Image: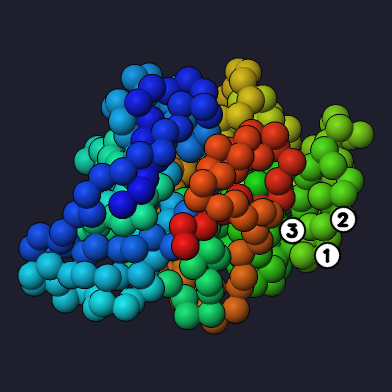
């Protein structure tokens, strides 16, 4: 089988296409023929050596997100059959409940080998069935970005409900799924970008209001104006410390900020958080239970993930370069057929 590894990290050029024997499933394991994978900003950090304090182990197989077909099962496998269409969960042992110290050590494409391979062995517990209306390419976008957005909007103290307002920063994978989940819930979505073309596209996809943050640096003032001075109920904060002060000012009194991204630097002043009684949640993807709940909603509302561009397996480096360019809207996908 063919696969990509990272003998070193530091540049996209370190991605190395190689071959290994196709594994066989042991007791409780499932062999999946991967059909598609998708990229997250985390994957770019892994490849360029910027992920975590110690990076990843040499020869790590990258990528957390992929979908494929079950082609062989081991003894005592009861959750899946040959021919089933599946996706791996981001943390292979976070099945439900609250996150604990053991879960990050099972994260695909970081602590563990990922899915950028023609065949991948999974424990049967580390997979979910794909919604039937989605292609493999669409299903491959779900494990990280979609589950992260679902966790942010539905797994907190104040789950999203009809009539709520949501602020979405940017047009990457998490924010686009946030838009789709907000639409499905009957919530109002306000979305930011530095590109008028992207803002036009998200309005076509259902955003109720948009703000160009380059043209309006104090965009929190526009958010307040758009909500008649109340502020939004939820913020999907993918920027980090550099955008967080404006997100806090955009939130309503007692609103919820879901902190996901680390793209911008800066310092956080806790005074504003206390003054507005904001609930701030750190989001690190989610559990299998959340994934399965989300898939039921995706099926019910016939949600189709937004894919920006698809690349062939042999063009994996080009896919990473496209992600790095930040020209994408939605997900960047690699096909393995």
Question: How many numbered circles does the render carry?
Answer: 3
Callout 2–callout 1 Cβ contact below 8 Å: yes
Tell me how the rendering is colored.
rainbow
Q: Is residue 241 above or below residue 195?
A: above
Q: Secondary structure at mark 3?
A: strand
Residue 42 vs residue 93: left or right? right
Q: CA distance from mark 3 to mark 2?
A: 14 Å
x, y percentage for residue 148? 49, 51
Residue 88 vs residue 334: left or right? left
Q: CA distance from mark 3 to mark 1?
A: 12 Å
Residue 331 vs residue 200: left or right? left
Label 3 neighbour load within 10 Å: few <14, some 14-19, many 20+? many
Between disc 3 and disc 1, whose residue precedes? 3
Residue appearing at x 61%, y 73% in the figure: 303
x, y percentage for residue 248? 67, 36
Residue 122 shows in the view: yes
Label 2 neighbour load within 10 Å: few <14, some 14-19, many 20+? few
Callout 3–callout 2 Cβ contact below 8 Å: no
Q: Which picture quadrant has residue 76?
A: bottom left
Q: Which residue is mark 1?
A: 204
Q: Which picture quadrant has residue 127?
A: bottom left
x, y percentage for residue 84? 33, 76
Q: Secondary structure at mark 2?
A: helix
Residue appearing at x 78%, y 66% in the figure: 206
Of badges 3 and 1, nearer the viewer stands 1
Q: Which residue is mark 2?
A: 200
Between disc 3 and disc 2, whose residue precedes? 3
Q: Which residue is mark 3?
A: 189
Q: Which label number is shown at residue 130?
A: none
């Amino acid at each position: 089988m063919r696969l990509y590894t990272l003998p070193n990290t530091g540049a996209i050029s370190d991605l190395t296409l190689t071959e290994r024997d196709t594994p066989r499933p042991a007791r409780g394991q499932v062999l999946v023929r991967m059909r598609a994978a998708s990229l997250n900003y985390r994957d770019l950090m892994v490849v360029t050596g910027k992920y975590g304090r110690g990076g990843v182990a040499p020869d790590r197989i990258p990528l957390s997100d992929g979908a494929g077909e079950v082609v062989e099962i081991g003894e005592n496998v009861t959750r899946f059959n040959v021919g089933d269409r599946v996706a791996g969960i981001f943390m292979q042992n976070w099945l439900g409940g609250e996150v604990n110290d053991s879960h990050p050590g099972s994260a695909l494409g970081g602590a563990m080998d990922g899915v950028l391979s023609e065949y991948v062995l999974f424990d049967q517990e580390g997979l979910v069935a794909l919604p039937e209306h989605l292609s493999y390419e669409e299903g491959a976008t779900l494990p990280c970005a979609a589950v992260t957005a679902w966790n942010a909007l539905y797994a907190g103290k104040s789950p999203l409900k009809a009539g709520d307002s949501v602020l979405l920063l940017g047009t990457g994978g998490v924010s686009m799924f946030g838009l789709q989940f907000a639409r499905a819930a009957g919530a109002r979505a306000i979305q930011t970008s530095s590109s008028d073309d992207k803002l036009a596209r998200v309005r076509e996809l259902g955003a109720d209001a948009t703000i160009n943050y380059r043209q309006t640096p104090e965009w929190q003032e526009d958010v307040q104006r758009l909500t008649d001075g109340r502020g939004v109920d939820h913020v999907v904060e993918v920027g980090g410390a550099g955008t967080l002060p404006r997100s806090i000012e955009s939130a309503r009194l007692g609103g919820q900020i879901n902190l996901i991204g680390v793209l911008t630097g800066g310092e956080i002043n806790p005074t504003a958080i206390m003054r507005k009684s904001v609930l701030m949640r750190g989001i690190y993807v989610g559990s299998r239970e959340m994934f399965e709940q989300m898939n039921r909603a995706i099926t019910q509302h016939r949600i189709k993930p937004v894919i920006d561009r698809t690349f062939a397996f042999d063009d994996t480096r080009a896919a990473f370069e496209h992600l790095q360019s930040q020209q994408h809207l939605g997900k960047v996908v690699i096909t393995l057929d």
